[in-house]
Amino acid sequence: MIRTFYFILEKEFKQMMRSKGLIRMLIMMPIIQLILLPMAANYSIKNISLAVVDNDHSEYSRTLVHKITSSGYFKLTAYTKNTKEAFKEIEKDNADLILEIPHNFEKNLVRENGQKVSVQINAIEGVKAGLSGGYLANIINDFNSEIRTRWIQPQGPDEAAIVSIAPINWYNRYMNYYLFIVPGILVTLITGIGMLQTAFNMVKEKEIGTIEQINVTPVKKQAFILGKLVPYFVLSALVFIIGQVVSFLFYNIHSTGSYFTVFVSMCAFLFALQGFGLLLSTYAENQQQAMSLGFFFMNILNMMSGLYTSIDSMPMWAKVMTGSFPLSHFIRVMRMVMLKGSSITEVGDHLLIMVGLGLVFNTWAVLNYHKRS
Amino acid sequence: MITLNNITKTYGKEKTMAVDDISFSVNKGEIFGLIGPDGAGKSSIFRMLTTLLVPDSGTAVVNGFDVVKDYKQIRNSIGYMPGRFSLYQDLTIEENLNFFATVFNTTVEENYHLIKDIYIQIEPFKNRRAGKLSGGMKQKLALCCALIHKPEVLFLDEPTTGVDVVSRKEFWDMLKNLKKMGLTIMVSTPYMDEAALCDRIALIQLGKILSINTPEKLVAGYGETLYTVTGGNMYQLLNLLRSYAPTESCFAFGDSLHLTLKKGTSKQIATAFLEQQGFNKVIIQETTPGIEDCFIKLLKSN
């Protein structure tokens, strides 16, 4: 039995290693993605094109525009005479935002102690629109308080009471975006290997017909299936380790918590993930079907596992669903351990769930794999 | 050695009949041939006997074991070569052989005597990957792998399909040697010339057995005089003879026609008829029927 299993493993490793092109791809592609994606896929919105309609041409209006452009988020792409022209800029996609400063802006501000400016936002890209509007509002507020303090000569400390906020960002002090996104991306990258390759590897036997030959042997299906899991487990783990090194070298990310915990969690994650891959393979007749199924689930996992959007803000049904995704648990664990320094007992719940999911998926796959039809 | 009792197998929701209430048995130490066109149900029979497929009804016993209840024992005592080459193309000859020996809990050395004659032919290429072998070599390797655990019954599903004539002949010589070693061999083939090499054959069509007999008795039981017709445009001749009232049957056979005539019509009468129709060079000769002729006759009478 042990000897048979050893030979099955030997066969699997040989087959994997002989497909040199595949191995090279499976190792190189995630690394390239890990280097490129976090730099490109950035949340912070920059280079917002701004069109200004200044009907006032006063000192104040110029100060305001200057203040906005010097914030670093906006670039002034048009300075038009009227709203109509500015709107054309939006239509031509040259501007994302129009700021209109009315006539007598300065005069009304000084005399009547208030003035309205109009902001029009191109809302085609929802997130960008929301954030840029927010940025602009902040800057205008800032401008507001600046001129207020200029007018009201402070006579005592209590004269202009303002509540000011001094936030502290725990675990990610400078809100370093990479710290947040890189471990998550690494997890999705090894998902590709762990889930898809495991499924393809199994389906390949069906497609080539070798499964027929295996099925007439007395080999235990458990041994055969386990033999299918191990090589891609090793490969996924290898890519994971390389990925950690790359994150350190390129983004200076190192785990606050212990790497041992990270690694143990990865094992639990791969166990569940590969079980899911196997399960897919038992339902797919050929590699094309396995590929389609795989991509279907990859998309769902990537979009719903809390990598890009917060799970807490999802509807209830989606929250329940994500609970059954090994990916969402592992991404959470990765962030907890790497950013927060959580210990293995603190992430214990997630570990147990992943192991549980692994048991369910693998058992299901073994039961669904029939040596007879 | 192999017994089938009323085995039936249907596929899918439409209950497409693949094997229709078949019963026959194969004796120990014989080469038994399943002869029939594609889709006759040969592979389904193989897959049921090798425990890969569970029959809808009926029972089958292989080497004393029931194919449904004792499938585990059967797997240890049979060798199976599926119709499609199904060894690992990315492993070498040697690795494939070692692997299949191991999964059967044995070693190549232990049963080397069984495969020796076949293996020495492919041994010079033992480090070549199976995917890079020629059709004939692949087939020899597959046979070695099916034999390596010393099975008592060998199931070969269309082993010579897509293999050149020389390799096919070599392959049948190997089967004869294996028979001498005491193996029971069940083989299927769509080639009628190979049917004559079996001890007994079952002609099968649309999931039903038309006849089971030795090739000699099958041919001897043809019961009619068979003629070959040569000379002249074959297509026109065929159409003419089929419309000719005294013709019993007429079909193309290679570059000639095979013809049987109704009682009371001699070849002279037929020749005269053809000459009258303008076919002057036609020669009609008596010939001994082959298995294909018997098969076609059986198909017609069914």
Image (cartoon, coloured by chain):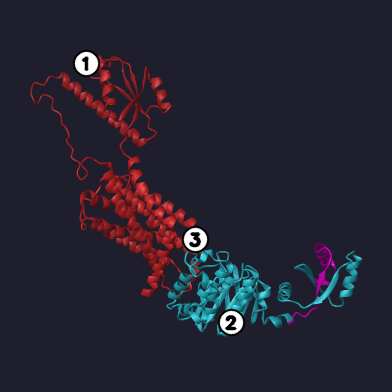
At label 1, the amino acid type is Val
| The N terminus of chain A sits in image quarter | bottom left
- Residue A57, position in %: x, y? 30, 15
Question: Which residue matches tag 3?
Answer: A285
- Residue B119, position in %: x, y? 53, 75
Up/down of A251 relative to B174, above or below: above
**Considering depth in this image, is A44 or B15 the residue closer to the camera?**
A44
Along the horizontal axis of the image, is A330 left or right of B99?
left
Along the horizontal axis of the image, is A324 left or right of B191?
left
Q: Colour of chain A?
A: red
At label 3, the amino acid type is Glu
Residue in the picture at 91% in, 70% down = B272
Residue in the picture at 36% in, 58% down = A235
Up/down of A26 relative to B205, above or below: above
Residue in the picture at 23% in, 27% down = A141
* Label number found at residue A110: 1
Magenta stretch: includes residue B222: yes
| Chain identity of mark 1 | A
- Residue B83, position in %: x, y? 57, 69
Structural distance between the alpha carbons of marks 3 and 2 = 39 Å
Along the horizontal axis of the image, is B15 left or right of A48?
right
**In the picture, residue B239 is in which quadrant?**
bottom right
* Label number found at residue B177: 2
Structural distance between the alpha carbons of marks 1 and 2 = 112 Å
Q: Residues within 10 Å of mark 3 (few under 14, many from 20)?
A: some
What's the magenta region? B220-249
Q: Nearer the viewer, mark 3 or mark 2?
A: 2
Magenta stretch: includes residue B81: no
**Tag count:** 3
| Secondary structure state at the residue bearing disc 1 | helix
| Chain identity of mark 2 | B
